[in-house]
Image: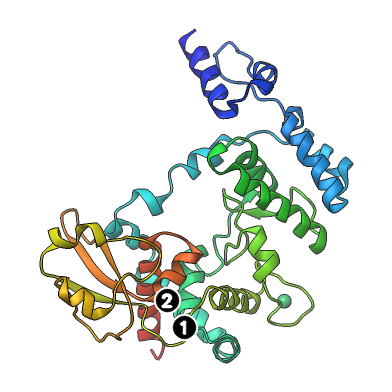
C-alpha cells in the first residue's frame, strides 16, 4: 500500500493542479506489482490544449497530432537522465576523461583533414576558429558517431508534460520540432536524437535547428546527420550568433594566492567579471600569455582534493552558450588545443 500512496503523491506532485486530479486518478492504476500504469498522452487535457494551439497558431494537422499523442507514452528514462546530467554531477577530472583521450584527438585530426576546405571557408565566412568547431562536434557526438537513437517526439512530449521544472521550455522545443518536421518533410516519430531531443552531429535543439542551422554544402537541404559541411557551418553560425571573437584567447591557467579570499568569485556568473589588473589586486594571476580584457575566474577539480584555476574570457562564455557547464566548456577547449597541436602530424 505504501508504494501506491507514494506513487500517487509523486504523480500529484508532478501535475500539482486540482483540475487534473481526475486525470491523475485515471492515469494511476495500481497493478499487482503496485506500479503506475500510464495512459497515452492524448488523455491529458493540456496535451489536447497543445494540439488546439498548434492548429490555431500554425494550422498544424490536428488529426496527425491526435494520432501521435494517442500512441505516445511517458518515457521514464528521459526524466531520470535529465535529472542526472554528468555536466552537473561528475568532477572535472573524471568528466574530461570522457572526452580528452588519444582516440578522440586522433579522430578530430582526421575529421579536420577531410573537411579542410570547409574549415578554411568557415573561418573566412564566420570568423570562428576551426579547432573549436571540430572539438564541439567531437564532444557532442564523437564526430557524428553518437547522435542519439531515441525518438525525439516521445522525448520532447515526456519533457513537455511530465517534467514541470522545465516544461514550458520543452513545450516550445516540441512546437519547434513539429514545425521543423513539417518544413523538412520528416515523419513524426522517425527522427532520432538525444534523451532531451537534441538533433544531429551538433546536437542542436529543434529551435536552434530552425534558426541557426545552415545548408553549408549548398545541396538544397540542411542535414545535420549526414553532412559534415552543414554541421561545420551550423556550429560556426551558432558561435558567431553568440558573439565568438576570432583568434581571441578563451581561457588561461591562473594562480590564486589566497583561495579563501576569492572563494565567492569562483565560477560566478556567465560573463567576465574583472579586468586583469583587478584580478591582480585580488591575488589572481595568469600563468600563461594573456590579454588585458575582462575575465572570469573558473575553478575545476583536477583531482579529488585539488582545485585548478583559469581566467576565462568572452569566448569561454560563448562556449557555455552551447552548453551551460564549465566542465563542458573547458573540455571543448582542451580537446580543441590537442587537435590543433596534432593537426600537422
Ligand atoms: Ca546541405
Query: Could you tell me if residue 136 is visible in this image?
Result: yes
Residue 46 appears left or right of 344: right
State the image coordinates of residue 245 (x, y, percent, origin top left): 46, 83
State the image coordinates of residue 145 (x, y, percent, origin top left): 55, 64
The CA distance from mark 1 to mark 2 is 6 Å
Count of numbered circles on the image: 2
Q: Tell me if label 1 and label 2 are in contact, CB under 8 Å.
A: yes
Residue at point 66% right, 58% down? 206
Residue 181 appears left or right of 328: right
Q: Which residue is most to the left?
A: 257
State the image coordinates of residue 313 (x, y, percent, origin top left): 36, 76
Q: Looking at the rendering, in which quadrant would you find the C terminus? A: bottom left
Query: Could you tell me if residue 71 is visible in this image?
Result: no
In the rendered structure, find residue 315 and report the number of the disc placed on it.
2
Q: Residues within 10 Å of mark 2 (few under 14, many from 20)?
A: many
Classify 39 as above or below 148. above
Residue 92 appears left or right of 10: left
**What sort of colour scheme is used for the picture?**
rainbow
State the image coordinates of residue 182 (x, y, percent, origin top left): 82, 57
Residue at point 83% right, 38% down? 67
| Upstream in sequence: badge 1 or badge 2 | 1
Residue at point 38% right, 74% down? 333
Residue indicated by mark 1 = 245
Amino acid at each position: 500500500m505504501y508504494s501506491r500512496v507514494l506513487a500517487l503523491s509523486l504523480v500529484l506532485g508532478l501535475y500539482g493542479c486540482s483540475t487534473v486530479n481526475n486525470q491523475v486518478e485515471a492515469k494511476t492504476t495500481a497493478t499487482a506489482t503496485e506500479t503506475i500504469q500510464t495512459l497515452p498522452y492524448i488523455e491529458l487535457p493540456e496535451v489536447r490544449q497543445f494540439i488546439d494551439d498548434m492548429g490555431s497558431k500554425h494550422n498544424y494537422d490536428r488529426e496527425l497530432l491526435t494520432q501521435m499523442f494517442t500512441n505516445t507514452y511517458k518515457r521514464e528514462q528521459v526524466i531520470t537522465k535529465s535529472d542526472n546530467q554528468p555536466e552537473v554531477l561528475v568532477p572535472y577530472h573524471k568528466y574530461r576523461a570522457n572526452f580528452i583521450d588519444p582516440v578522440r584527438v586522433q579522430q578530430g585530426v582526421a575529421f579536420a583533414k577531410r573537411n579542410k576546405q570547409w574549415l578554411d571557408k568557415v573561418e573566412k565566412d564566420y570568423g570562428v576558429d576551426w579547432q573549436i568547431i571540430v572539438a564541439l562536434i567531437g564532444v557532442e557526438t564523437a564526430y557524428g558517431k553518437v547522435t542519439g537513437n531515441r525518438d525525439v517526439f516521445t522525448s520532447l512530449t515526456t519533457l513537455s508534460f511530465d517534467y514541470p521544472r522545465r516544461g514550458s521550455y520543452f513545450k516550445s522545443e516540441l512546437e519547434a520540432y513539429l514545425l521543423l518536421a513539417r518544413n523538412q518533410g520528416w515523419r513524426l516519430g522517425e527522427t532520432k536524437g538525444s534523451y532531451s531531443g537534441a538533433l544531429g552531429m551538433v546536437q542542436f535543439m529543434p529551435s536552434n535547428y530552425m534558426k541557426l542551422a545552415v545548408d553549408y554544402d549548398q545541396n538544397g537541404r540542411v542535414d545535420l546527420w549526414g553532412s559534415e559541411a552543414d554541421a561545420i557551418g551550423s556550429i560556426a553560425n551558432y558561435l558567431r550568433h553568440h558573439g565568438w571573437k576570432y583568434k581571441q584567447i578563451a581561457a588561461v591557467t591562473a594562480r590564486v594566492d589566497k583561495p579563501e579570499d576569492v572563494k565567492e568569485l569562483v565560477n560566478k556568473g556567465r560573463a567576465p567579471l574583472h579586468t586583469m589588473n583587478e584580478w591582480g589586486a585580488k591575488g589572481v594571476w595568469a600563468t600563461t600569455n594573456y590579454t588585458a580584457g575582462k575575465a572570469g575566474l573558473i575553478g575545476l577539480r583536477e583531482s579529488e582534493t585539488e582545485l585548478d584555476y583559469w581566467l576565462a574570457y568572452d569566448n569561454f562564455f560563448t562556449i557555455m552558450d552551447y552548453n551551460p557547464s564549465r566542465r563542458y566548456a573547458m573540455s571543448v577547449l582542451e580537446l580543441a588545443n590537442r587537435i590543433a597541436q596534432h593537426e600537422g602530424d
